[in-house]
Image: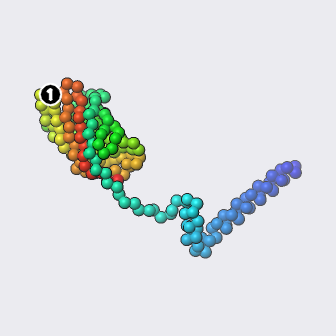
């Protein structure tokens, strides 16, 4: 065997031994019941706490409106989007389906900065000569990003549909907790 191989094997054994000794020294206090000192040391270096920390739920009072434009139409389903104004700024997406002469359903998503808030709506539907109107409720069941825990039920969902271009003016209001 060459001297360089022997030195390499020797260095490897030395590193493995040092790592093993380091592991033993780290774990030995745990066996002796000194967990609080290690937890304090972990907190000082920014380690994640082992016990979950509770935080208070945040409640948002949504009061959004948007003048949407048609992005696509398939049968009795209107896909629309437009800027949201009100409590949060972002984009509102609505997939509104006319399910009967008196009812509509919708998937609604509001995408403010940092995530999205989405849910399902059902509403009564009334046709007029130039516009149709809808009014009902929305349940928020999912969110992403900073709104990942968003939930809410009984939010107001209403608006009008212009028959000439299928543009929707929509309003959403109510409380959402996360």
Number of marks present in the image shown: 1
Q: Residue at x 29, y 43 (%)?
A: 86
Viewer-nearest residue: 149 or 66: 66
Residue 81: which quarter of the image?
A: top left
Q: 63 left or right of 115?
A: left
Q: Residue at x 41, y 46 (%)?
A: 145
Can residue 100 be seen in this snapshot? no
Q: Which residue is situated farthest in the left direction here?
A: 129
Secondary structure of the residue carrying tag 1 is: loop
Residue 41: which quarter of the image?
A: bottom right
Q: From the top left corner, tell me how far across and down residue 113 is, in percent.
A: 39, 42
Query: Is residue 121 depicted above or below 80 in this figure?
Result: below
Q: From the top left corner, tell me how far across and down residue 31 is, in percent.
A: 60, 72
Q: Residue at x 40, y 48 (%)?
A: 146
Q: Which residue is situated farthest in the bottom direction here?
A: 32
Dot 1 alpha-carbon crowd within 10 angstroms: few under 14, some 14 to 19, many 20 or more: few
Q: From the top left corner, tell me how far across and down residue 175 is, in percent.
A: 27, 51
Can residue 76 be seen in this snapshot? yes
Q: From the top left corner, tell me how far across and down residue 15 is, in percent.
A: 74, 57
Viewer-nearest residue: 58 or 101: 58
Residue 95: which quarter of the image?
A: top left
Q: Residue at x 25, y 31 (%)?
A: 78
Q: 6 left or right of 121?
A: right
Viewer-nearest residue: 92 or 140: 92
Q: Which residue is situated farthest in the top direction here?
A: 164
Colour pattern: rainbow
Q: 138 left or right of 100?
A: right
Q: Which residue does the numbered mark 1 point to in the structure image?
A: 130
């Amino acid at each position: 065997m060459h001297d360089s191989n022997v030195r390499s094997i020797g260095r490897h054994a030395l590193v493995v031994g040092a790592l093993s000794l380091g592991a033993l020294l780290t774990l030995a206090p745990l066996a002796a019941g000194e967990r609080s000192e290690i937890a304090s040391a972990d907190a000082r270096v920014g380690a994640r706490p082992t016990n979950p920390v509770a935080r208070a739920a945040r409640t948002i009072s949504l009061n959004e409106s948007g003048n949407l434009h048609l992005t696509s139409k398939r049968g009795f389903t209107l896909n629309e989007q437009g800027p949201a104004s009100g409590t949060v700024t972002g984009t509102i997406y609505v997939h509104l389906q006319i399910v009967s002469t008196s009812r509509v359903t919708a998937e609604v998503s509001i995408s403010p900065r940092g995530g999205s808030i989405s849910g399902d709506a059902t509403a009564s539907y009334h046709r007029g000569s130039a516009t149709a109107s809808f009014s009902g409720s929305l349940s928020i069941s999912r969110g992403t990003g900073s709104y990942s825990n968003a939930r809410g039920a009984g939010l107001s969902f209403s608006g009008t549909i212009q028959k000439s271009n299928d543009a929707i003016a929509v309003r959403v209001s109510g409380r959402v907790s996360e």
